[in-house]
Amino acid sequence: MQPTSLIAPLLLLAVASTAVAAPPKAQLIDHSSDALISAQSARSLLAEGIPAKVWKIYPASKWAFTSQVEGGLTANGTCVVTARVMMLPLTPSLKAVLFRPSKTATAFDAQAGSTAEQCRDLAKNKLKKAIESVVSSLVKA
């Protein structure tokens, strides 16, 4: 077989592989306190909590979501937690996140007599509430 007869199929394969690019990956950013929730857990909760309907209307190529969970145990054993979720635009050219929140939700709570584990559970629940609030403001269930 001559090398020139292999060029056409290889060229076709190269063009086909560039034409079918994967959709952009969603930017899920976390700025939480590691004492309450890990960044991986927070991003996982964001990914689970944002339905496909949202991504259809607000594509990942134009929008990012960020979470922030702060707080902890006070000296007398009260767990204080604040969880915030924001939907942020991306720049058109660089796909960098702009801190100009389009939607924001904050959930907070305090629970007396908590252990560290109970405080982490409260943090996850408040983050879920904040995610639900942002999502419900974007799409109907």
Image: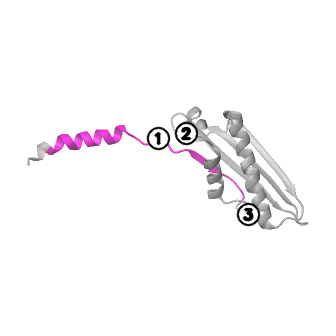
Categorize mark 2 by other alpha carbons within 10 Å: few (<14), some (14-19), many (20+). Answer: many
**What is the distance, in whole Å, between disc 2 and disc 1 at their CAs?**
8 Å
The numbered disc on residue 12 is none
Tell me the residue at 82%/67% (across/down). 115
Q: Quadrant of residue 40?
A: bottom right
Nearest to N terminus: mark 2 or mark 1: 1
Q: Nearer the viewer, residue 132 or 35?
A: 132
The residue wearing badge 2 is 60
Nearest to N terminus: mark 3 or mark 2: 3
Give amino acid for label 2: Ala
**What is the distance, in whole Å, between disc 1 and disc 3 at their CAs?**
34 Å
Nearest to N terminus: mark 1 or mark 3: 1
The residue wearing badge 3 is 35
Seen in the picture, residue 97 relative to 123 is either above or below; the reply is: above
The residue wearing badge 1 is 23
- Which residue is the extreme one toward the left? 1
Which region shows up in magenta?
Answer: 6-33
Q: Nearer the viewer, residue 112 or 69?
A: 112
